[in-house]
Structure formats: C-alpha cells, structure tokens
Image (tube, helix red, strand yellow):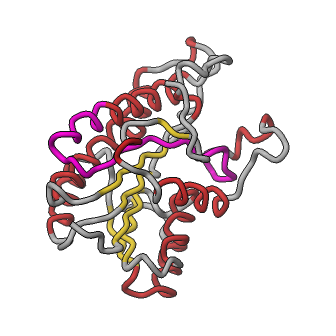
C-alpha cells in the first residue's frame, strides 16, 4: 500500500521528540504528525506548534507504562484510516525524581531498575505492537526506537549506569526479535533501534561535563540527522542497531 505522509512521534513534548515533531511539520511531504505525550506533561511547546500548523499536528495523550492508556491508544489507532508511514519512539528516561544512574552495583534498587525497563524497554515494544496491529498487514511502515550507545554490550568499557545500559540493551533485543517476526507477519515493515548521539536535552544535561568538545548536538541537529537515516531505512536494515549516521553499532 502506498504511503500517505502520516508520521508519529512517541514522547513528543520535549527534547529530541519535540525537535522531531517540529522538523516533520515543516516537511511538505508530511501530511500529518501525531504527537503523543503523557497526560501530565508540559505541552506548551506542542501547543505552540499546534497553533502554527493547525490540523497538520494531532496531539494524543499516552503513558507507555499504563495499560489503560495503551488500550485507549489502540482504539485511537483504529480510527486512523490509511495507516502510518513512520513512527519514532522518543520516550525514555535516564533519571527521574529519585532515580539516578548508578555508579556502582551498591546503588542498584529493584524499583528503579524496574522503572527503567518499564519505560525504556517494555514501553516501546508494547507501543510497536499496538501500531502493527492497527496497520494493514502488507503496508509499508517503519518503526524506529531511540536507543543509546551505552546499550551496546560490546561497547561497554566504563561500566556503571546499570539500569539505563541494561534497559537499552533489552530494547535492542526486543527490536531485533520483533524484526524477525515481522518478516513473515508484516513483510513490508522495518523495525530499527537508533542511537541519536549526545544531545543537549534535560536527559543529558546533568552529565554533559564529560562530553568531548564538538560532540554535544542541539535537538534540531539530532532530529535532522535521525530523520535522514530513518526515512531511508529499507527492509534489509530491519532489526539493526544504528548510529545517528546510519552506521551499524555492535550489539
């Protein structure tokens, strides 16, 4: 089935998600952007975009860790006639309230680790499942989840950040496994994990002192690079873990 210019961003109210939303709204090839956010999120920037772009932007409340919210999301998707071309899952956490990256195993707490997996790993998988179920089976569709270089087991040289590393590694495994199932069930679907690069957002801000000069990117730079890679994804690349420049990253 031909594409219709409809895109989706999960976690669109700030950071990279907001920049991805704005970038696609400016693209004349895109007919509509569906931007999700948590019910209690600050949506002032999304509201501004909505005033600028009118019906081209559709907002929808979604909490990827809440089963009722996911069911409502499923019903919402069933109403989107024609399907969606590209969905980018940008929702994720590194720190949250009393959750901070662990420097040692002695700082690991079960509830914090579970929360990391809930948002960074399980959430994207469940969202992808809802999207696939609502798509025509043979429709061309790309699902890209923002992962992280630190989720690479082969690249782990520094240790630490137990929960974030492990949750992103789990996300990568989910993406790989989902891509294998899609080969037969959804033969025109591409599923990838992608590392956006270190971006100047609330997520990275407390840890930017260790970033090398020239390696910290604005959300707009990151969004433009990600869109360039994601829009060019083909079926042969499905199941890959990619860098922001499109090059593969070691598992």
Q: Quadrant of the N terminus?
A: bottom left
Say whether residue 198 is magenta.
yes
- Judged from this view, the residue extending furthest toward the top is 106
Query: What x and y, as percent, mark residue 9?
Result: 41, 61
**Left or right: 102 with respect to 125?**
right
Residue at horizontal 26 percent and vertical 43 percent from the top: 126
Query: What x and y, as percent, mark residue 77?
Result: 20, 64
Residue at horizontal 39 percent and vertical 72 percent from the top: 33
Residue at horizontal 37 percent and vertical 67 percent from the top: 7
Residue at horizontal 36 percent and vertical 72 percent from the top: 59
Task: Write down the quadrant of residue 114 in the picture.
Answer: top left
Query: What x and y, as percent, mark residue 103?
Result: 64, 20
Figure check: 161 above or below 121:
above
Please give the range of residues in magenta.
Answer: 177-203
Taking depth in this image into account, of 11 and 65 the one nearest to the observer is 11
Q: Does residue 85 appear anywhere in the picture?
A: yes
Say whether residue 80 is magenta.
no
Figure check: 108 above or below 3:
above
**Left or right: 67 with respect to 64?**
left
Q: Does residue 97 appear anywhere in the picture?
A: no
Taking depth in this image into account, of 186 and 64 the one nearest to the observer is 186
């Amino acid at each position: 089935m031909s594409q219709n210019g409809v895109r989706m961003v999960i976690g669109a109210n700030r950071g990279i998600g907001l920049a991805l939303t704005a970038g696609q709204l400016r693209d004349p090839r895109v007919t509509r952007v569906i931007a999700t956010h948590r019910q209690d999120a600050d949506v002032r920037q999304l509201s501004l975009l909505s005033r600028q772009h009118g019906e081209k932007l559709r907002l929808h409340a979604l909490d990827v860790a809440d089963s009722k919210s996911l069911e409502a999301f499923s019903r919402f998707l069933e109403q989107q006639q024609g399907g969606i071309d590209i969905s980018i899952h940008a929702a994720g956490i590194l720190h949250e309230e009393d959750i901070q990256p662990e420097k040692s195993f002695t700082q690991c707490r079960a509830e914090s680790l579970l929360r990391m997996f809930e948002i960074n790993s399980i959430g994207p998988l469940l969202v992808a499942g809802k999207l696939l179920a609502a798509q025509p089976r043979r429709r061309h569709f790309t699902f890209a989840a923002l992962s992280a270089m630190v989720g690479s087991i082969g690249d782990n040289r520094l240790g630490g950040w137990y929960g974030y590393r492990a949750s992103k590694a789990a996300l990568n495994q989910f993406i790989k496994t989902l891509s294998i199932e899609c080969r037969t069930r959804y033969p025109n679907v591409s599923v990838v994990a992608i590392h956006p690069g270190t971006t100047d957002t609330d997520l990275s801000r407390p840890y930017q002192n260790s970033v090398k000069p020239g390696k910290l990117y604005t959300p707009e730079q990151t969004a433009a690079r990600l869109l360039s890679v994601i829009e060019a994804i083909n079926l042969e690349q499905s199941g890959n873990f990619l860098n922001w420049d499109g090059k593969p990253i070691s598992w």
